Amino acid sequence: MNGVNLTLRVLHHGEKHLAKQLTAVAERHRTDPEIHHVALDLADWSRAHAQRLSDSADRHGLNLCDFADTPWPHLLSTLREKAAEALVHRPEPGLLLLRDLRELHLDAAENSLHWEMLAQVAQATKDDELLGLASACHPATLRQMRWTNTMIKVLAPQVLTGL
């Protein structure tokens, strides 16, 4: 496997992982409308990135079909809803939210680095299609990082000082 295919595979996995994590955080914090709705929107961005990566990988002879997706998404959604309801009664939901935002930020940062790597190899190999893909998707990943960073800046003082 060459470096381009490896980068496509790792980035595809990273975007699918981030989409799943964003969806889980949205469900876990469904009582906070801003977190819930923004996280769901950001998850859609990552799913779109994963689809675009899969389409591009096909043109490079790489199959990124994900057979690990669950056939029971409604069951997982119900379980997440029940878990979110249980968390409402926990005394430390703010600490959980900060941890979730930190994890999301790190996942998005990792994806950002891989988008940068893909852009660099696309420039080196003069692959305009891959460069266009990275140029189109990487800014959204940077916006995901800015959102998590902003939310951490807003919430950390309140949560960590007990205000």
Image (cartoon, grey):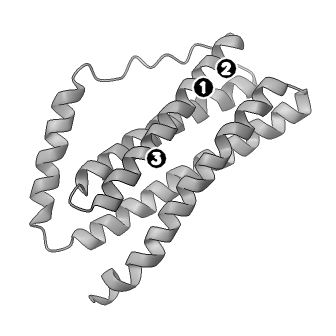
Instruction: Report helix, strand or loop for mark 2.
Output: helix
Considering the image in quadrants, where does the C terminus appear? bottom left
Q: Is residue 147 above or below residue 114?
A: below
Q: Residues within 10 Å of mark 3 (few under 14, many from 20)?
A: many
Q: Residues within 10 Å of mark 1 (few under 14, many from 20)?
A: some
Residue drawn at x 84%, y 26% is 128
In the image, residue 152 lies at what x, y percent?
44, 71
Query: Which residue is labeled 3 in the image?
Result: 42
Residue placed most toward the observer, 36 or 115: 36
Amino acid beneath label 2: Ser
In the image, residue 121 lies at what x, y percent?
82, 34
Residue drawn at x 68%, y 10% is 61
Give the mark count: 3
Query: Which residue is labeled 1 in the image?
Result: 52
In the image, residue 141 lies at what x, y percent?
59, 48
In the image, residue 100 lies at what x, y percent?
36, 60
Amino acid beneath label 1: Arg
Q: Are marks 1 and 3 in contact (CB under 8 Å)?
A: no
Residue drawn at x 50%, y 38% is 46
- Disc 1 versus disc 3: distance between alpha carbons? 15 Å
Q: Is residue 125 rendered to the left or right of residue 162?
A: right
Q: Are marks 1 and 2 in contact (CB under 8 Å)?
A: yes
Query: Which residue is labeled 2 in the image?
Result: 56
- Disc 1 versus disc 2: distance between alpha carbons? 6 Å
